[in-house]
Image (cartoon, rainbow, N blue to C red):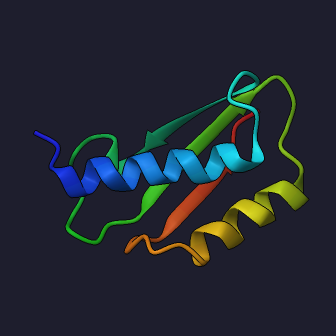
Amino acid sequence: MVNQKIKKAEKEIKKIIFRFLNPKEYQIFIFGSRATRKAKKFSDYDIGIFGKKPVSFETLGLIDEAFENSDLPYIINVVDFS
């Protein structure tokens, strides 16, 4: 079962990413230890992005900066699979 803290964090991750990307053009997904539910308490989040066109380096930088400035207690790694 996913606890409320994790649900809240995942909702915030989605909110931050879609501040910079159109959700009609891109999908996001969790991969790595969080996806397999084998994560430790402070494991990072690996977030994949998939769309018809690659995300620009500028946009990826803005997303990374938004995560650094957020209150999320996790490291967020974003990978573009487009």
Q: Position of residue 58 (x, y in %)?
A: 89, 60
Residue 21 image-quadrant placement = top right
Q: Position of residue 54 (x, y in %)?
A: 85, 38
| In this rendering, position of residue 75 left or right of residue 60 | left
Residue 55 image-quadrant placement = top right
Quadrant in which the N terminus is drawn: top left
Closer to the camera in the image, 71 or 82: 71
What residue is shown at x 27% (from left), y 40% (from top)?
A: 36
User: Compared to 26, does 31 lie above or below?
Assistant: below
Q: Position of residue 14 (x, y in %)?
A: 53, 44
Outermost residue on the left side: it is 1
| In this rendering, position of residue 56 left or right of residue 35 | right
Closer to the camera in the image, 74 or 20: 20
| In this rendering, position of residue 26 left or right of residue 52 | left
User: Compared to 82, does 66 lie above or below?
Assistant: below
What residue is shown at x 66% (from left), y 43% (from top)?
A: 18
Closer to the camera in the image, 8 or 55: 8
What residue is shown at x 42% (from left), y 70% (from top)?
A: 72
Q: Position of residue 5 (x, y in %)?
A: 23, 58
User: Compared to 8, does 36 lie above or below?
Assistant: above
What residue is shown at x 65% (from left), y 38% (from top)?
A: 49
Quadrant in which the C terminus is drawn: top right
Closer to the camera in the image, 27 or 38: 27
Q: What is the tally of numbered marks visible in this picture?
A: 0
